[in-house]
Amino acid sequence: MAERTVQLVLHYDGAEFSGWQRQPDQRTVQGALEAALERLCATPIAALGSGRTDAGVHARGQAVGIRVPARWTGSVPKLRRALNAVLPSDVWVAAAFEMRPEFHARYSALSRRYSYYVGTDEEANSPFRVRYELAFGQPLDRGALDAAAAHLTGEHCFRGFAVLGTAPEQDDHRCRVTDTRWRDRPGGLVFEIEANRFLHHMVRFLVGTMLDIGTGRRPLADLPRLLGAPNNSEVSPPAAPHALFLDRVTYPNDLYAEGA
């Protein structure tokens, strides 16, 4: 059967999902999307994400690769509308693009970008905010946070900021960070980071450690030392998942089909 390759860009609220990856007897984003695709295409359709997000983590730029029957050729906007009509309310297809056959949602990605929201005012505890940001009621040294983030740019081994076994032992656990910063926003801060790859819990371990530095619980000198650590035994606990967003996945322009 002739097929066409499509990239879907998903928004989802991760609060009621047990993460991205399909699991038996658990509600997952991949499972919900594949159920919707099977309903529309009358055959099982595998949905390959650019990476896995943990339980509770949100996305407004998760990229997903699918192969659909050729009858959807030229009808990618129609496919997007049809999916949004049958997906649950906490998943939304923001965009859809026809891609070249060699597109791979995971291995073709040039970079991924995440953001983590920290609320520093009293209103961060409001039910309208606490679902999507970490209500942090302690003073933070902004200069220390900025200095910590600056250490992360470049290529480093992030074994000290990853769950044990997140990658094969022979993997070097190296990630190339191209942009990282703390940014002011109304009511608090947001940490933004872009890299070619991320390890399991990596962003959350980084945020947890930087918040400890920002409060003075640990010195700034710990961060470069942890970048050379052989394991995560000395890292701070990971920040809570509910304030983390996968914002964007970037691919080479030549993987988009003509006119996509």
Image (cartoon, rainbow, N blue to C red):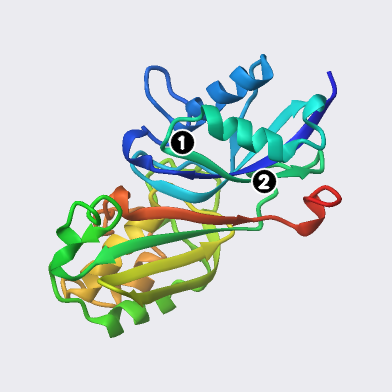
Give the residue number, with chain letter if any, for mark 1.
Answer: 20
Residue 80 vs 57, above or below: the answer is above
The image shows residue 118 at horizontal and vertical percentages of 27, 65
Kindly state the secondary structure of the residue where label 2 is placed: loop
Which one is in front in this view, the residue at disc 1 or the one at disc 2? Answer: 1
Residue at image position (77%, 35%) is: 75
Residue 172 vs 47, above or below: the answer is below
Give the residue number, with chain letter if any, for mark 2.
Answer: 107
Q: CA distance from mark 1 to mark 2?
A: 17 Å
Q: Give the left or right position of residue 140, taking residue 147 as reference.
A: left
Q: Nearer the viewer, residue 205 or 138?
A: 138
The image shows residue 148 at horizontal and vertical percentages of 35, 76
Q: Residues within 10 Å of mark 2 (few under 14, many from 20)?
A: few
Whether residue 161 is visible, yes or no, is no
Residue at image position (30%, 74%) is: 186
Q: At label 2, which amino acid type do we have?
A: Tyr
* Screen quadrant of the N terminus: top right
Residue at image position (38%, 76%) is: 183
The disc placed on residue 72 is: none
Residue 19 vs 151, above or below: the answer is above
Q: Nearer the viewer, residue 260 or 219?
A: 260
